[in-house]
Image (tube, rainbow, N blue to C red):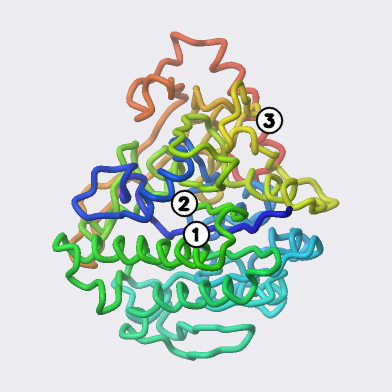
Amino acid sequence: MQPNFIIMFLDDSGWADFRPFGDTPYPTPNVERLTREGGRYNQFYVPQAICSASRASLMTGCYPGRHKIYGAIPPRARGLDPAFTTMAEILKPAGYATGVFGKWHIGDHEETRPPARGFDESSGLMYSNDMWKYHPQSRHFDDKELQFWRNGEIQINDVTPKQQRSLTTWYTEHAVDFIQRRKDGQFFCYVPHNMPHVPLYCSDKFEGKSEHGLYADVMMEIDWSLGEILKTLDETGIADNTLVVFTSDNGPWISYGNHAGSTPYREAKGTGFDGGTRSACGMRFPGHIPAGSVSNQAFCSVDLLPTFAQLAGATLPDRPIDGVDVYDIITCKPNATNPHKYYPVSTGRTFDGVVSGDGKWKLHLPHKYRTLAEAGNNGQPGRYEDAHIDFSLFDMANDPYETTNVLDQHPDVAKQLQTYAESHRDRWWTETST
């Protein structure tokens, strides 16, 4: 029987923001339940640690160098070329009902919004919740309303701070309603929450609940959202036939200090280091993913589309994609190997380097990157400064924090990865690394 698919995709969540990934001072029982009843994946990557590029890659199974969505696109932008098939457009012909409830951010023209991209039902914002007149930094959004859409129509023309407090609740309620109505057939439910992207908001029912500040309150509400969806699967009797994925589009926006998440890895959002591109990931698929399993094998968000297509009996698009079926890795099959030779890593239009397909090595090409100089506080941003990394090879199996360059000790590994990196850069990227 074809399984249902649910992806909860957070915005700017840190790797350590939820138990069991981090030792948080606030409870996250539903993420813990998901990983206890399914699997925890410690080396799950996104190809670029910025909103739109990451989301476009998830939806298409393609790297940014192929689909050409870099960084975060602005309001009213056309976004992803409709020639690139989305996950919903692949699953729908296979008999799936499709719904998206949350932040889209890969197109804000009629032909690039969710109803035109394979989704039967949709609600949410077309871009980030900070792209509005209340942004603490000058981002030229003063003349842009923050619109809330539902099923192709503007439901709220100018979202207020008070209404932002309801976003997580609205998305959860819409997703639960969708699941309840679609329980007798196959469905794909995509829940890309706006939170915990700044500005942070949570509902009255979670404000102050954590006793550890607003960010912790927001995390507890997201955990509640996951719990509501898991409860609905139980109540409708379809939990055993549903693959649930919980992860984030990239790492934390650390310049916001106590309004940002945490990661044990180097740097954060907006960089090619693992603090930006490695996202905590939990999945549950009863009877297929061993309960309580922990995987340290690398795979990437681009791999979810072909994996889902294989499980659904769906046809992949005619044009090439970059992801591959990694079901054996997800289900922790003995001796499962990753078919990828490498995964490319980028930041905006800068190509940063590659991770080996087995996740054991990472090569940075020379490039500039931002690093935190001073953190902000209570919703105000801090300050970054520029830094530079030269050719560098990191032994990710023994040094996942990218602290020690072992280029001289492993010249053959470095040479092979450099060949992959330069070939990929020269083929797909309009700007080379600097």
Q: Which residue is mark 3?
A: 423
- Secondary structure state at the residue bearing disc 3: helix
Label 2 amino acid?
Thr
Name the spot of residue 230 as percent of width and height, x first: 46, 61
Q: Mark yes or no: residue 196 visible.
A: no
Give how far across and how far down residue 252 sits, in percent: 35, 52
* Residue type highlighted by circle 1: Met
Q: Is residue 89 left or right of residue 15?
A: right
Instruction: Out of 22 and 408, give the one closest to the viewer.
Output: 22
x 38%, y 28%: residue: 400
Q: Quadrant of residue 327?
A: top right
Outermost residue on the right side: it is: 318
Q: Nearer the viewer, residue 406 or 360?
A: 360
Q: CA distance from mark 1 to mark 3?
A: 34 Å
The residue that disc 2 covers is 247
Task: Check disc 1: other Cα within 10 Å, few if <14, some if 14-19, many if 20+.
Answer: many
- Give the answer, above or below, for where 116 lies relative to 223: below
Residue 97 in view, yes or no:
yes
* Sequence-earlier tag: 1 or 3: 1
Q: Which residue is mark 1?
A: 8
Q: Are marks 1 and 2 in contact (CB under 8 Å)?
A: yes
Query: Dot 1 lies on which element?
Result: strand
Q: How far is the residue under mark 2 from the one under mark 3?
A: 30 Å
- Give residue 131's mark: none
SS at mark 2? strand
Whole-percent x, y for residue 73 in the image: 54, 65
Which image quarter: residue 201? bottom left
Q: Which of the two discs, 1 and 2, labels the residue nearer the N terminus?
A: 1
**Where residue 76 sits: x, y (%)?**
58, 77
* Count of marks overlaid on the render: 3
